[in-house]
Amino acid sequence: MNKDIQPSAATALLDYQAAARYLGGLSRSTLKALAANSDLRVVHIGRRALFRRDDLDAFIARKSQGDAV
């Protein structure tokens, strides 16, 4: 396996803590609620729940257009 392969910044996977920081400091419970309401897509790998950075950017763009959190 080639260890030199790195994901692009847009497809990088972020855990709850990193995703919360990326979204300006949201709480874990808020992220869970957004995922449960299908506002944010979650990628499950094993027992880990991760967020794609491009999905977070799309969420920010939707909210910037006037959609309330």
Image (cartoon, helix red, strand yellow):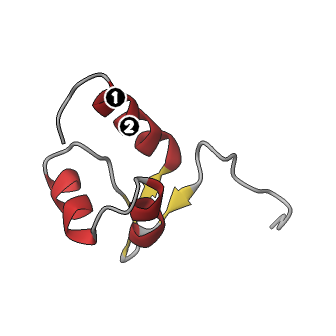
The residue located at (30%, 22%) in the rendering is 65
| Mark 2 secondary-structure assignment | helix
| Mark 1 secondary-structure assignment | helix
Q: Nearer the viewer, residue 7 or 39?
A: 39
Among the 4 quarters of the image, the one containing residue 59:
top left
The residue located at (43%, 60%) in the rendering is 19
Q: Nearer the viewer, residue 56 or 5?
A: 56
Q: Horizontally, is 22 left or right of 10 in the view?
A: left
Q: Horizontally, is 45 left or right of 67 in the view?
A: right
Are the residues flagged by discs 1 and 2 in contact, CB closer than 8 Å? yes
Among the 4 quarters of the image, the one containing residue 4:
bottom right
Amino acid on which disc 1 is placed: Ser
Residue with the most extreme bottom position: 47
Residue 40: x, y in percent?
Answer: 29, 46
Residue 5 drawn above or below residue 63: below
The residue located at (41%, 56%) in the rendering is 24
Residue 10: x, y in percent?
Answer: 60, 42
Residue with the most extreme top position: 65
Amino acid on which disc 2 is placed: Ile
Q: Quadrant of the C terminus?
A: top left
* Residue count near mark 2 (Cα–Cα under 10 Å), binned few <14, some 14–19, many ≥20: some
Q: Quadrant of the N terminus?
A: bottom right
Number of callouts = 2
Among the 4 quarters of the image, the one containing residue 6:
bottom right
Which label belongs to residue 64?
1
Residue 18: x, y in percent?
Answer: 48, 66
Which label belongs to residue 1?
none
Residue 46: x, y in percent?
Answer: 40, 74
**Distance between mark 1 and mark 2 Cα atoms:** 6 Å
Label 2 belongs to which residue?
60
